[in-house]
Image (cartoon, grey):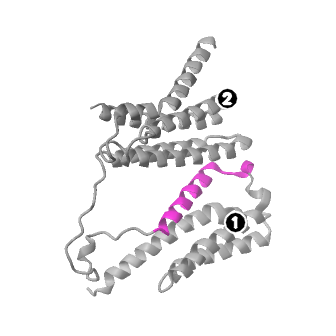
Amino acid sequence: MSVETPDRARALSARSNMLLPGLLAWVSTVGAPAFERGVGSGARVFACAALVAMVSGPFLTGPRPWVGRAVGIHTTVVLCLATWLSLGANIGVQHLEPVRAAIGAVAWVLFAFGWGATRAPGTPEDDPRAIPGAPLPARSHLPALAAPIFAIGLLGAALTSFAAWRVARPSHALLSHAAAVVSAIALVTSAAKIAVDRQDYKPLTPATLRLGAAVRPLSVLAIALIVRFAWMLVE
Amino acid sequence: MVARVVDVISVVLLVAAAGAFTMGVSALGDRRDLDALYWLAVGALTLRSATDMLRPKGASR
């Protein structure tokens, strides 16, 4: 097996990660509405151009990655936006098919992740291009249970996002999605803070001081829960 | 020991916030707008409480 084979396999895998979710997102949210009956040719031209940009982007990432990103991400997104604007009322909330839209939303998220880069598996020092020397030890480690706590945040974010798709009223559907996105961001951000900023990781602070810091929101929360309980009794 | 309990409370509040947000968005789907606002506000307060416990004002960093 030649030395270049793993590199080629890696490049093919990276391109698949960019292309497959992108194609699914394009089919479900751009192609399907653009090629319905009664849609003007302008929207179809934009949709086809978006597809061409999306497919060609990953193949332009070789020597100049910024060209690939400009075509594969920015041009694609701009052309998709132009398609949606050209479609006008044809993609109104009342015409929305929830399952297809949900698949499209997830596919767009995966498309964004596909363009991201992760560290290649294996030990970095084992790479033949690595500068020889003693391995650099990590300065600190994540506290225990950091991953499960972050997973709780991710699960909560996913639950709120899925709950938003249950809203059938067109006037409230957009509001519910906005609320779900804000909630999901807040949950993931806070889960990350709680996962790594806990007592066993950061400098020690007295527990009373930590509880005292949360007294104000906790008091308002307690009042809200009491009001709710009282309201339930009245009802 | 007390510090560990505060950590647990913080995680429990995170779970409660996730539940409150989900209930809030679900309430919108069930046409209970007032409930939705209530649960979203409770979720925000719960989350704020959970993170405030991690960053006490005046603590040495």
Q: Position of residue A227 (x, y in %)?
A: 59, 19
Quick one: quadrant of the C terminus of chain A? Answer: top right
Up-down relation of residue B9 to residue A80 (above or below): above
Position of residue A120 in the picture relative to residue A159 (left or right): left
Predominant SS along the magenta part: helix
Q: Which numbered circle lies on residue B34? A: 2
Residue A132 picture quarter: bottom left
Q: Toward the viewer: A215 or A149?
A: A215
Position of residue A205 in the picture relative to residue A158 (left or right): left
Quick one: quadrant of the N terminus of chain A? Answer: bottom left
Up-down relation of residue A128 to residue A162 (above or below): below
Q: Position of residue A188 (x, y in %)?
A: 48, 48
* Residue A87, visible in the rendered structure: yes
Q: Position of residue A48 (x, y in %)?
A: 67, 74
Say if the magenta span includes residue A69.
Answer: no
Q: What span is colored magenta in the figure?
A: A93-116
The residue lying at 51 percent from left, 38 percent from top is B48
Q: Toward the viewer: A79 or A67?
A: A67
Q: Residues within 10 Å of mark 2 (few under 14, many from 20)?
A: few
For mark 1, what is the residue? A81
Q: Amino acid at mark 1?
A: Leu
The residue lying at 56 percent from left, 31 percent from top is B42
